[in-house]
């Protein structure tokens, strides 16, 4: 009698992380922690034979009826940072067995007026500066679309084509998602729980992504959870980071995209900093990208 052979699919990075959680955590904590994993899209310069999902810098292709965004209070046009093609991002993720929470085939164009030399700072904690960052939700690109020339007061960054790979996005030890999942009564509890410290935290280090360009997933914060910075700004900046209102509000926000300082594009955000655009989960689901807020952290 012939023996039937079965083939098993190769282990994915998600499988590896689930295995680590089961090894180091109780069954209940392992289930809670793996439930926090989100697909994140890591972005880097595309080589000649790689699919392109967007670009850093250069000039955007804007529909004729879409104006280049300006910062009225500062009397300046915003600089174009990046463009991401949502359909292309979803296709890359689908090819890797992942589904992204993007309900549009359109494009996202990111602009900011941040310029330290000119004394212009966009601060999530200062509502008066929020107009210095903008996300435009554009239709899919038409083959005949032309690049929009930059306004006279804007010097474009060098263009860098971007490709993508989907990875499991790990919440930081101080992530509000972790605080919500494990019911930390105090912010300090995150440094004492087995899911956010000790042997499990050390086992995760080789699998963690640090900084870099990314769409969706958990933000890779440099100086504490960026969700908390946005929450403090939204709630008026008068509450401590461990206030229950801040913790609850921070848990509502998720990463839309982050863009690191990039030598190829000539982008430098402060001292080797990263720009983070965050959005509430309900606004992401409803394609309300105009509701995204920008914050920045430096090394």
Image: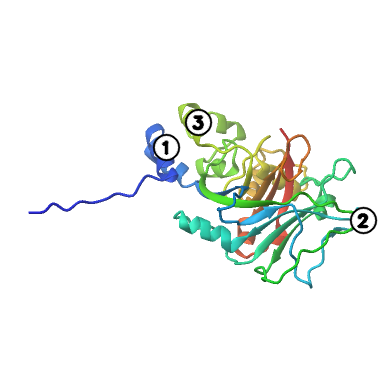
Report the mark closest to the observer, 2 or 3: 2
Return the residue found at the far top. 198
| Residue 288: percent from left, percent from top | 67, 63
Distance (Cα) linking label 2 and label 1: 51 Å
The residue singled out by tag 3 in the image is 201
| Residue 187: percent from left, percent from top | 61, 35
Image point 77% across, 34% down: which residue?
271
SS type, badge 1: helix
Quarter holding the C terminus is top right
Q: Is residue 147 above or below residue 177?
A: below
* Left or right side of 156 for 224: left
- Of labels 2 and 3, earlier in sequence is 2
Return the residue found at the far left. 1
SS type, badge 3: helix
The tag on residue 231 is: none
| Residue 48: percent from left, percent from top | 59, 52
- Of labels 1 and 3, earlier in sequence is 1
How would you rate the neighbour count of disc 3 (Cα within 10 Å): few for under 14, some for 14-19, many for 20 or more? some
Would residue 101 be visible to someone looking at this image? no
Distance (Cα) linking label 1 and label 3: 10 Å
The residue singled out by tag 2 in the image is 75
Quarter holding the N terminus is bottom left
The residue singled out by tag 1 in the image is 21
* Left or right side of 266 for 5: left
Image point 60% across, 66% down: which residue?
104
Residue closer to the observer: 239 or 277: 277
- Of labels 2 and 1, earlier in sequence is 1
């Amino acid at each position: 009698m012939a023996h039937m052979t079965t083939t098993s699919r190769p282990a994915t990075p998600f499988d590896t992380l689930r295995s680590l959680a089961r090894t180091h955590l109780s069954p209940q904590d392992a289930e809670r922690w793996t439930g926090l994993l989100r697909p994140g899209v890591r972005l880097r310069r595309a080589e000649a034979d790689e699919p392109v999902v967007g670009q850093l810098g250069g000039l955007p292709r804007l529909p004729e009826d879409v104006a280049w965004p300006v910062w009225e209070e500062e009397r300046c046009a915003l600089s174009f940072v990046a463009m991401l093609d949502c359909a292309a991002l979803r296709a890359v993720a689908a090819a890797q067995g992942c589904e992204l929470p993007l309900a549009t085939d359109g494009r996202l164009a990111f602009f900011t007026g941040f310029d330290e030399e000119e004394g212009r700072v966009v601060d999530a904690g200062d509502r008066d500066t929020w107009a210095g960052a903008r996300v435009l939700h554009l239709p899919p690109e038409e083959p005949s679309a032309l690049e929009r020339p930059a306004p006279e007061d804007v010097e474009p960054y060098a263009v860098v084509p971007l490709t993508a790979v989907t990875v499991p996005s790990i919440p930081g030890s101080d992530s509000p998602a972790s605080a919500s999942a494990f019911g930390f009564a105090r912010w300090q509890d995150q440094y004492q729980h087995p899911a956010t410290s000790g042997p499990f935290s050390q086992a995760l280090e080789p699998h963690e992504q640090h900084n870099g360009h990314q769409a969706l997933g958990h933000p890779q914060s440099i100086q504490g959870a960026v969700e908390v910075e946005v929450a403090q700004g939204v709630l008026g900046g008068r509450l401590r980071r461990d206030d229950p209102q801040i913790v609850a509000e921070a848990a509502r926000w998720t990463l839309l995209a982050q863009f690191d300082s990039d030598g190829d594009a000539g982008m430098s955000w402060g001292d080797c900093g990263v720009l983070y655009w965050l959005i509430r989960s309900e606004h992401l689901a409803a394609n309300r990208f105009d509701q995204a807020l920008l914050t920045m952290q430096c090394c």
